[in-house]
Image (spheres, rainbow, N blue to C red):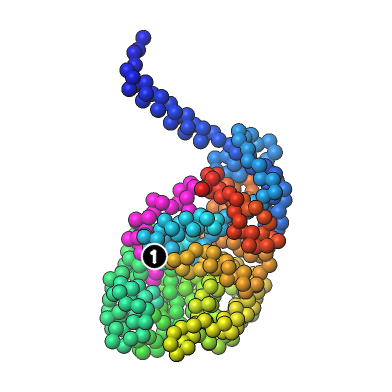
Amino acid sequence: MIQLKNFEIKLLIIITAIFGACQSNQTKVTKYSNGYVFNGVDFNKASFVVKHGELDFSTSAKFNTEVDLTGKYVIPAFGDAHTHNFDDVAKFDSIYKAYIDEGTFYVQVLTNHYSNYLKIKDSLNSAGKIDAKFAHGGITSSGGHPHSLYETQALNYSWRAMLDPDKKEEILSSTIKKDDAYYLIDSVSDIDENWSKIMSNKPDFLKLYLSNIADRKKNIENKNIGLYGLSEEVLAEIARKAKRNNIRIVAHVETVSDFKIALNYNIKYFAHMPGYGGGIGDPDLEALQISDSILDLAGKNGAVITPTVSFAKYYANQWDGSKMSLDTLLLQKKNEFLKKQLIRYREANIVIALGADQGYSTLREEINDVKKIDAFSNLELLNILTQTPKIIFPNRKIGALKNGYEATFLVLNNNPLIDMNNIENIEMRVKNGITLK
């Protein structure tokens, strides 16, 4: 008979307990009963089982624990289709928690420092954690957006330095963040030289900056840094190369002309609507309106636009002689324009995704500003919010509550179709079958 010493017995007890807990987690099958489940049109009373991180709505599904959802409303989780969050390592934990709290479990980072990504990547993209895709550096030209912005920050200047003739040359020649936060491609011949560097970081998509293409040469000659991006010739070649490499392009556009040119090269994903936020200051809003024919073409091509309407309140600030102040009448004018355009987009079958294009706030800002302009019904807005994750991760079974789909959902205390503010009253958050705190 084998005799075990005291420490061996204690060790055996610990190992057995750990093994038992692991087995318990692996075999735990939970039934969520009597909740009202969103089907894309309405809420139906239903029960479902979560097993191995997937949904099972069959009535014969076996389970060993049960959660009563009587009177609760179950919806898919949200996605942020345009952010620069997670690029600031110091803010990672607070932003991560804010996303979890609001029910945003899927994130698309449209330009980031690859070096910062390496520091936080292990905290993402696994069961029970936020899933994120990254561009790993935007593609632009020398002095263009965001080269000038990143270098202004790297030189410890405020953004106004880009307007200072004495600082423009320093910013223009600075490359502190090159090949990390951005790549510079000034001509077609530069593409092959940079392509291997870009692809070596395994970006999930390419972020191309197409800013005022029609006025690009004039802006370069006048050293209007930050007001331009890639040339059309470079765009055309990168579009061909991306297609051969089966990698998606997301285009930053400023003008209707930028949008039309991008469509000509079969680009489907747009980080902004033209003049996002109704343009800076008080521009000619009609110049920011896409024609019916171009909208129809975009809709038929499956275009996806992230409008970023939350910029309107920033772009409606005016100089009052001593400081920048919000011009409420101008903001109202912009919001009316944005409402009209978003309704036209939906009528043209443009797919709308939401994202605030921020590095310090979450999706909540964009949701609140979209609600204010009242362009969508509660049902339309709820579908936009819950289907955005599928736009970010098109090959996954997410964005709906169906058999075999990932068990990722939010449990609300009240019906959001009656009042969209109810999406803020979350009772329970579940990601891949794991209940989050």
Question: What's the residue at 53%, 67% (across, down)?
Answer: 365
Q: Is residue 436 left or right of residue 167?
A: right
Q: Position of residue 217 (x, y in %)?
A: 39, 86
Above or below for 96 versus 1: below
Q: Position of residue 346 (x, y in %)?
A: 64, 71
Above or below for 47 versus 191: above
Tag 1 residue: 112
Above or below for 222 versus 96: below
Question: What's the residue at 55%, 80% (across, down)?
Answer: 278
User: Magenta part of the protein: which range?
Assistant: 113-141
Q: Amino acid at mark 1?
A: Asn
Question: What's the residue at 58%, 37% (across, down)?
Answer: 29
Question: What's the residue at 35%, 69% (across, down)?
Answer: 182
Nearer to me, 67 or 204: 67
Local SS, label 1 = loop
Query: Total number of numbered labels?
Result: 1
Where on the picture, by quarter, is residue 302? bottom right
Where on the picture, by quarter, is residue 103? bottom right
Q: Is residue 139 left or right of residue 267?
A: left
Whether residue 132 is in magenta: the answer is yes
Above or below for 80 versus 309: above
